[in-house]
Image (cartoon, coloured by chain):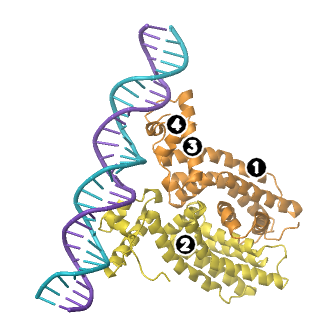
Chain colours: A orange, B yellow, C cyan, D purple
Amino acid sequence: MTGQVRTVDGRVAGRRGQATRQKLLDCLSEMLSSSPYRDVKVIDVARKAGTSPATFYQYFPDVEGAVLEIAEQMAVEGAGLTDVLAERSWVGKSGWQTAQELVDGFLDFWRKNDAILRVVDLGAAEGDKRFYKIRMKILNSVTNSLTDTVKDLQAKGKVDKDVSPAAMAGSLVAMLAAVASHQKGFQSWGVKQAELKPNLALLVHLGITGKKPTK
Amino acid sequence: MTGQVRTVDGRVAGRRGQATRQKLLDCLSEMLSSSPYRDVKVIDVARKAGTSPATFYQYFPDVEGAVLEIAEQMAVEGAGLTDVLAERSWVGKSGWQTAQELVDGFLDFWRKNDAILRVVDLGAAEGDKRFYKIRMKILNSVTNSLTDTVKDLQAKGKVDKDVSPAAMAGSLVAMLAAVASHQKGFQSWGVKQAELKPNLALLVHLGITGKKPTK
DNA sequence: TCGGTAAGCTGACGGCATGACAGGACAAGT
DNA sequence: ACTTGTCCTGTCATGCCGTCAGCTTACCGA
């Protein structure tokens, strides 16, 4: 792997250095939650961390670079989203439960990391490959798992042949991500979480199996 | 309505002024397509428009303000997204066609305006009410129309009672918007537009009617 | 034709963020 | 106490921000 944490000018960071670095990342993370991405300045992050801008530039090339770092850390956690799907069945009652748990896991993860995910989404949409790769890392495990499920069901003749597994899985995952990042929007529009979740689960189930769930 | 276009300091803009203003908006729009939102500077927009930064500030409070203006213009067009749905049936073959045309319209509109929509999405996700309102304006017409359709089908007993029309419609629209804004991502991931569209249409049809379409 | 008036534009300026560097502070081992 | 390498910051040149006073241009009525 990357081995050691290094400063911009190539020195290896020691214990103290790593602590400072992490503190900067934490403060940046906090700032992203409280103010628009466009307005986050290096000087503010540094001040919040009780250090100077120069220190920031010792560890990161710019704000974007630091955000990438945070996103990378998050992506590692996010890979665990797929645990919910491991060895799970999509038939009968347990199929319905699988769908529900997937939705739950997604919404939770997004709510917990909404600020960074917003920025990652933007970067990916703007065509930045680094952000795009991270977004992949998070979504791919789930997408791949769902793709395989659809292929499986197709092989057994339970799903129409003209469904494209990858497109279907990708669309569903994109939907989950989108709804998750606009959760607040839904609420202020009069849709409660409690009714949102089952409807998402229903859509996921319909998309994967082609059938209504048995509850 | 708004009546007249005004400068920041209250003067009414004449013919020439409006032309300059529009030119600045056009240049900003172009810049948003070619460089990350975070890096778009007033001075660059002004230079591109062949004018000075001070002129920019005469017409807009800041970059964000100008973006809102562009978004507003786009939202007017976007309201036409709902035309596809007017008086359309969701039963039988025509139901399948309705779903397809909705998907088509959405993807086209998004591809045409992806740069501004990205920023609007970010602003909305960050909790900025002005951006959120614009996003609503674009999506609401479609969402409301779909919501009504689901309610209708429920009343006729064709859709389960425990589906929340608003949540379902909102989720589907969010999906369309999300997939649309990551169209390039899908492609570079090996999913072609040609297979993406029918799968989205299938999901929409499944979500609204609860049944597979008859093609 | 000729002011008068309002619209339209810009040079210039203080203020602040950026990003680079050199040098000082600090901890740990000898 | 001295050395060594890590760690932090003061400082500086550069460039963008956002504002103002003042100049130019267009329009209009007399």
- Report x, y in % for residue A24: 54, 40
| Res B121 quadrant in image | bottom right
Residue A83: assigned label: 1
Asked if one can make out residue B214 in the rendered structure from this viewpoint, the answer is no
Q: Does dot 3 land on a helix, a strand or a loop?
A: helix
> Which quadrant holds the C terminus of chain B?
bottom right
Tell which subunit mark 3 falls on: A
Tell which subunit mark 2 falls on: B
- Report x, y in % for residue B37: 47, 60
- Report x, y in % for residue B166: 73, 74
Measure the C-alpha gap from mark 3 to mark 4. Answer: 10 Å
> Residue beneath label 4, please?
A50
Q: Does dot 1 land on a helix, a strand or a loop?
A: helix
| Same-chain status of marks 1 and 4 | yes
Query: What residue sits 67% from the left and 55% below the top?
Result: A110
Kindly identify the amino acid type of the residue bearing the numbered disc 2.
Trp
> Residue beneath label 3, please?
A27
Q: Earlier in the sequence, mark 3 or mark 4?
A: 3
